[in-house]
Image: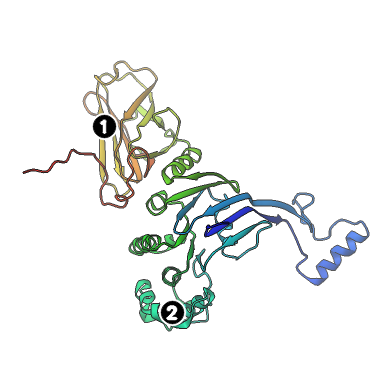
């Protein structure tokens, strides 16, 4: 382990599927008696696979995981749902034991794995603060010293002496995070529970975690928000099917995750009913690709975005017009791309036509963006118009890293020449 704050050595965690116990003493005795006589399992459920009885099938949530985290590092754990991220944090928090391997940690561990972790519903907010502090090994005087700061951060002052079972989910998570972040554990484990809080509280949490990281404490942060991971973490780990497939710089690991996990960029527009136009032509398919030509719907800042559009024409159209409008998730127009005859031949179109539009070196801030399509004739009579026909996502990273700029209230990030005037 040497000087590591966290050392994970060949850790694996297996779960058993199927019926493990009979649920009652009578059920267990019935199963034992049937097995003794060589009879079928009386508790076997119809339709379940053979062999999923008392012994069941093993599913490995984690396998051969090795990880060393140095003191003061902030490590992001990313991966698809079911990759084993939460299982790893539960093992580190001692909520569950590993099936194989060993875990060693130096220092007090504070964890926030789900809303209200470690809270007793019958105790008040004040009592749960002291309870969690005691679980972290803190003395009562230390907890009293931080109490006002915790209550102010969680914004639950007037409900402090009310049992937490009466708290809303937002109040629960605010108090739980405040306790975990302010009681100064040497190691802080945070699963993606901050999405429960409102936007303002999420910003407070990000700021607090940044302070925790700068304070020299070790943080493991699980999240599907690549912007938060890129902004908070000094390195990242990519889990896939229970195994670590990559560890390194945040930008590299996030890029690998987005490449491996990218969804298909193809959208079938022929089934869209909410459209306008006279019907002489219609969009039938849209496909988004990266600069290398691979289908995807997730890009990083500075990537080229390639859009392939397929259209069907019921009759020839001369001197066609087409446009794409890109809007942010809040409906603010960002790009308006217009094509006319000089861009590609739209004269005497055939029954089916494909067109490629490339947005070079886009500078969109991280977020989701929607594309609306418009097709018209030379008189600007609409042939087909599809609002929010498809969407794509922009994440931090790529050639332009926006670690400090993530969350700014803008849509487009442009690089400008700056000079100081005399």
Q: Nearer the viewer, residue 371 or 255?
A: 255
**In the shown orientation, is residue 45 left or right of residue 341?**
right
Residue 390 seen in render: no
Tell me where residue 345 sits by quadrant.
top left
Residue 325 seen in render: yes
Q: Quadrant of the N terminus?
A: bottom right
Residue holding disc 2: 142
**In the shown orientation, is residue 244 left or right of residue 51?**
left
**In the shown orientation, is residue 327 left or right of residue 111?**
left
Query: Outermost residue toward the top?
Result: 348
Q: Which type of secondary structure does the marked residue at label 1 adopt?
A: strand
Q: Nearer the viewer, residue 258 or 3?
A: 3
Q: Residue at x 31, y 15 (%)?
A: 348
Q: Residue at x 34, y 49 (%)?
A: 403
Residue 12: give x, y in percent of width and height. 65, 53
Tell me where residue 384 sits by quadrant.
top left
Q: Residue at x 66, y 51 (%)?
A: 60
- The residue carrying pointer 2 sits among few (fewer than 14), some (14 to 19) or many (20 or more) residues within 10 Å by Cα, namely few
Q: Residue at x 87, y 56 (%)?
A: 40
Between the residue at mark 2 and the residue at mark 1, the CA separation in whole angstroms equals 60 Å
Residue 251: give x, y in percent of width and height. 41, 43
Q: Nearer the viewer, residue 399 or 225?
A: 399
Query: Outermost residue toward the right?
Result: 37
Q: N-terminal of the two: label 2 or label 1?
A: 2
Circles 2 and 1 in contact, beta carbons < 8 Å: no
Name the image colouring: rainbow
Q: Quadrant of the C terminus?
A: top left
Residue holding disc 1: 337
Q: Is residue 152 above or below residue 258?
A: below
Residue 105: give x, y in percent of width and height. 56, 62
Residue 295 marker: none
Q: Is residue 250 above or below residue 144?
A: above
């Amino acid at each position: 382990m040497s000087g590591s704050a966290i050392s994970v050595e060949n850790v694996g965690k297996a779960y058993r599927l199927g019926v493990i116990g009979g649920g009652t003493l009578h059920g267990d005795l019935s199963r034992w008696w049937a097995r003794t006589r060589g009879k079928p399992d009386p508790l076997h459920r119809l339709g379940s696979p053979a062999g999923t009885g008392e012994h069941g099938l093993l599913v490995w949530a984690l396998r051969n995981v090795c990880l060393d985290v140095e003191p003061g590092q902030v490590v992001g754990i990313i991966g698809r749902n079911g990759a084993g991220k939460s299982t790893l944090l539960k093992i580190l928090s001692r909520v569950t034991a590993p099936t194989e391997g060993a875990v060693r940690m130096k220092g007090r561990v504070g964890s926030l794995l789900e809303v209200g972790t470690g809270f007793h519903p019958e105790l008040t907010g004040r009592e749960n603060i002291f309870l969690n502090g005691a679980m972290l090994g803190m003395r009562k005087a230390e907890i009293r010293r931080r109490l006002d700061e915790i209550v102010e951060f969680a914004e639950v002052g007037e409900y402090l002496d009310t049992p937490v079972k009466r708290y809303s989910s937002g109040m629960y998570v605010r108090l739980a995070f405040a306790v975990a972040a302010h009681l100064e554990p040497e190691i802080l484990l945070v699963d993606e529970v901050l999405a429960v809080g409102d936007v303002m509280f999420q910003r407070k949490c990000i700021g607090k975690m940044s302070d925790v990281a700068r304070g020299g404490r070790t943080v493991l942060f699980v999240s599907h928000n690549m912007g938060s991971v890129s902004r908070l973490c000094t390195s990242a780990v990519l889990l896939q099917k229970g195994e670590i497939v990559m560890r390194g710089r945040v930008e590299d690991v996030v890029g690998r995750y987005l490449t491996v996990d990218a969804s298909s960029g193809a959208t079938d527009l022929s089934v869209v009913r909410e459209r306008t136009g006279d019907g002489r032509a219609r969009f039938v398919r849209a496909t988004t690709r990266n600069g290398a030509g691979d289908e995807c719907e997730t890009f990083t800042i500075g990537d080229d975005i390639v859009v392939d559009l397929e259209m069907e024409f019921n009759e020839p159209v001369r001197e066609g017009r087409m446009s794409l409008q890109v809007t942010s998730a809040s409906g603010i127009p960002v790009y308006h791309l217009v094509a006319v005859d000089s861009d590609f031949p739209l004269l005497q179109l055939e029954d089916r036509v494909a067109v490629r539009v490339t947005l070079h070196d886009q500078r969109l801030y991280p977020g989701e963006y929607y594309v609306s399509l418009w097709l018209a004739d030379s008189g600007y009579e609409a042939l087909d118009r599809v609002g929010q026909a498809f969407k794509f996502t922009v994440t931090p990273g790529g050639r332009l890293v926006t670690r400090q700029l993530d969350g700014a209230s803008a849509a487009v990030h442009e690089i400008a020449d700056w000079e100081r005037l005399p």
